[in-house]
Image (cartoon, helix red, strand yellow):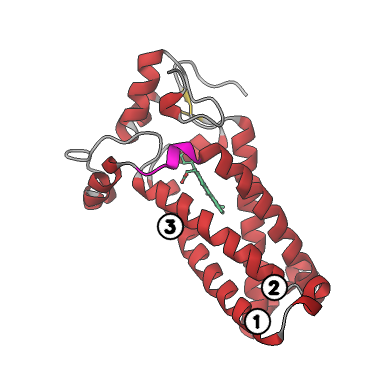
């Protein structure tokens, strides 16, 4: 895909495909999961061909999500490592939410909010995977007791609720910060966007004359 001259690469094609596969699996899991969560939501199972199909397909989509998110961890881990600047940024969250830049510390490739999304999902997805396997009766019923399954399902449901809340926050932020959506759909951002929202990242690119990060490398370390 061609990007307009002068713009910066934010996410490569592979990263974007990986992200949207994860997102599609997540949405399907939310719909199928909620339809099994409460009878009032059972009508949503019609989207998957009925209750039995929903129950059969949900764990398989979960496996695809887990593998897909593992690939995201590999690509995003370095840029999501916590730094002392993140606390200073988080303290100015009221200004960030009001779209004011004055007094907000400079941010590298990801801000503290984005890092929270990354780390929350990195914790919750393995919990969902393990507890999900515990209650995947078709294959693993004989390996677990009913009591274990009850606890596993409770933890699975609580982790799913937490992941849904994180996901809603993530989508809200992606819409709120104008220009972010294009970073994940078309893969590029304008220098103005980078200057405004990720100034440290912008400076590191400008210092090396690079248009964007190499996959798997921390953006700030790409050209060291
Ligand atoms: C379906 C709705 C979703 C939308 C509209 C969306 C939107 C976006 C956008 C626009 C970015 C780019 C941010 C940037 O480059 O600064 C992004 C990054 C990211 N997304 Fe999503 N996303 C969605 C679902 C998900 C899901 C379900 C997950 C995880 C399970 C996820 C995890 C991430 C991660 C880890 C990043 C990299 C930034 C970070 O480390 O926080 N996204 N998303």
Q: Identify the element where label 2 is drawn.
A: helix
Residue at left offset 46%, top offset 64%? 165
The answer to whether the residues at label 2 and label 1 have Cβ atoms under 8 Å apart is yes
Q: Which residue is mark 1?
A: 148
Q: Identify the element where label 3 is drawn.
A: helix
Does label 2 or label 3 sit earlier along the sequence? Answer: 2
Q: Quadrant of the C terminus?
A: top left
Mark 1 within 8 Å of ligand 1, using the beta carbon: no
Does label 3 or label 1 sit earlier along the sequence? Answer: 1
Does label 2 or label 1 sit earlier along the sequence? Answer: 2
Residue 59 in percent (x, y) is at 73, 65
Residue 147: which quarter of the image? bottom right
The alpha-carbon separation of the residues under discs 3 and 1 comes to: 32 Å
Residue at left offset 64%, top offset 70%? 131
Whether residue 51 is visible, yes or no, is no
Q: Quadrant of the N terminus?
A: top right
Q: From which residue to which does the magenta span run?
A: 77-82
Whether residue 78 is visible, yes or no, is yes
Residue 19 in percent (x, y) is at 60, 44
Which label number is shown at residue 134? 2
Residue at left offset 38%, top offset 43%? 177
Q: Identify the element where label 1 is drawn.
A: helix
In the image, farthest residue toward the left: 103
| Front of the two marks 2 and 3 | 2
- Dot 2, crowdedness within 10 Å: few (<14), some or many (≥20)? many
Q: Nearer the viewer, residue 197 or 106?
A: 106
The alpha-carbon separation of the residues under discs 2 and 3 comes to: 29 Å
Q: Which residue is mark 3?
A: 169
């Amino acid at each position: 895909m061609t990007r307009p001259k002068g713009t910066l690469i934010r996410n490569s094609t592979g990263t974007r495909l990986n992200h949207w596969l994860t997102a599609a699996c997540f949405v399907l899991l939310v719909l199928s999961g909620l339809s099994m969560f409460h009878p009032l939501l059972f009508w949503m199972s019609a989207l998957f061909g009925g209750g039995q199909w929903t129950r059969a397909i949900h764990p398989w989509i979960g496996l695809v999500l887990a593998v897909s998110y593992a690939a995201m961890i590999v690509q995003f881990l370095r840029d999501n490592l916590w730094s002392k600047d993140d606390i200073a940024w988080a303290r100015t969250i009221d200004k960030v939410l009001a779209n004011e830049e004055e007094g907000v510390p400079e941010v590298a490739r990801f801000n503290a909010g984005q890092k929270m999304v990354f780390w929350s999902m990195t914790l919750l997805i393995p919990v969902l995977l393990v507890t999900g396997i515990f209650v995947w009766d078709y294959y693993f019923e004989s390996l677990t007791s009913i009591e274990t399954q009850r606890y596993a399902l409770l933890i699975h449901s609580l982790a799913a609720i937490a992941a849904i809340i994180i996901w809603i926050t993530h989508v809200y932020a992606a819409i709120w910060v104008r220009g972010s959506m294009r970073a994940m759909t078309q893969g590029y951002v304008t220098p103005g966007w980078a200057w405004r929202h990720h100034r440290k990242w912008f400076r590191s690119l400008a210092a090396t004359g690079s248009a964007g990060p190499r996959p798997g490398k921390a953006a700030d370390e790409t050209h060291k």
